[in-house]
Image (cartoon, grey):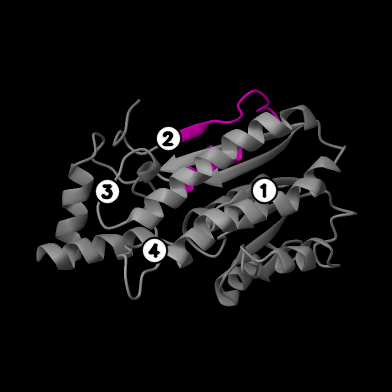
Amino acid sequence: MDTIIITGAGTGIGAATARKFAGLGGVRLICIGRRAQPIQALVEELGTQHVAWPMDVASREAWEALLHSDEANLHEHPLKGVFANAGVGGPNVYGEGDRWDEIIRVNLTGVYVTVEACRPWLVSNTRCAVRHVVVTSSVLARFGVPTQPAYVASKTGVLGLVRSWAVAWSREGIRVNAICPGWVETEMAQQSIQAMADANGHTYEQEHAIQADLLPTGHMSEPAEVAELVAWLMSDSQRSITGQAIDINNGSFMH
């Protein structure tokens, strides 16, 4: 049985994707998150063959410890795919208390370290003709918004990583793609909508309705919808898409 690593697995899109893969069967999951409790609860739900591993995704040392651990057991269960989904959101302002370093470290450096650390293990899995990396970017990599320069820069930066890796690694059988979600019903989105509501003098429900009404579909995605896309991008039948940023944003950005 091969292994798939999911970062940011404790909640939202990461947890929904873990549930999707567990439901499909045939793989074991290493579920990674900053907080131990959510990923441990998730693994208890999914089954004992899966692994919960709390860690800092931007730490090279933490990745070396995981990938060579008995718990990961990647020699017996080779690495088939990586969903680099961990991220933090919110505003930042230049000056005292600026969150630039924090946001860039998790969202950009964290993705870089995650995928580069895992690459040798993907290459060594000769049982699979194609292995997959999927990275979570954002619709905000498509257009700018005020007050969030670090978040926008980090999510734009990971698209550059994806293109570079796709060119470099495709002949090794590794396909690398990004997803660019818009509004998704997650804790991060709820926090953003609440901040907007507070700034605009609205209730959460009022602001949520306003933001949904701005979308051509009038609909915010559920995490399970995004999980379906990730699972397909990482499926055995998907061999021809690489270096792409796939938009799932209810029409808020159109090429």
Residue 202 x %, y %: 11, 64
Any magenta on residue 233?
Answer: yes
Query: Can you tell which of label 4 and label 3 is closer to the viewer?
Result: 3
Helix, strand, or loop for circle 4?
Answer: helix
Q: Residues within 10 Å of mark 2 (few under 14, many from 20)?
A: many
Residue 102 x %, y %: 47, 67
The Cα–Cα distance between marks 1 and 3, rounded to whole angstroms, is 29 Å
Residue flagged by tag 4: what amino acid is it? Glu
Residue flagged by tag 1: what amino acid is it? Val
Residue flagged by tag 3: what amino acid is it? Val
Looking at the image, which residue is at 47% across and 58% down?
12
Query: Can you tell which of label 4 and label 1 is closer to the viewer?
Result: 1
Q: Which residue is mark 1?
A: 82
Q: Which residue is mark 3?
A: 145
Q: Which residue is mark 4?
A: 187
The residue lying furthest to the right in this view is 76
Indicate which disc, 4 or 1, sits on the residue closer to the N terminus: 1
Magenta part of the protein: which range? 224-247
Residue 201 x %, y %: 9, 66
Image quadrant where residue 250 sits = top left
Indicate which disc, 4 or 3, sits on the residue closer to the N terminus: 3
Query: Can you tell which of label 4 and label 2 is closer to the viewer?
Result: 2
The residue lying furthest to the left in this view is 201
Q: Which residue is mark 2?
A: 247
Indicate which disc, 2 or 3, sits on the residue closer to the N terminus: 3
Residue 212 x %, y %: 23, 46
**Quadrant location, the C terminus:** top left
- 167 and 32: which is toward the camera: 167
| Cβ atoms under marks 2 and 1 closer than 8 Å | no
Looking at the image, which residue is at 61% across and 29% down?
242
| Cβ atoms under marks 2 and 3 closer than 8 Å | no
Question: Is 248 on the left-hand or right-hand side of 218?
Answer: right
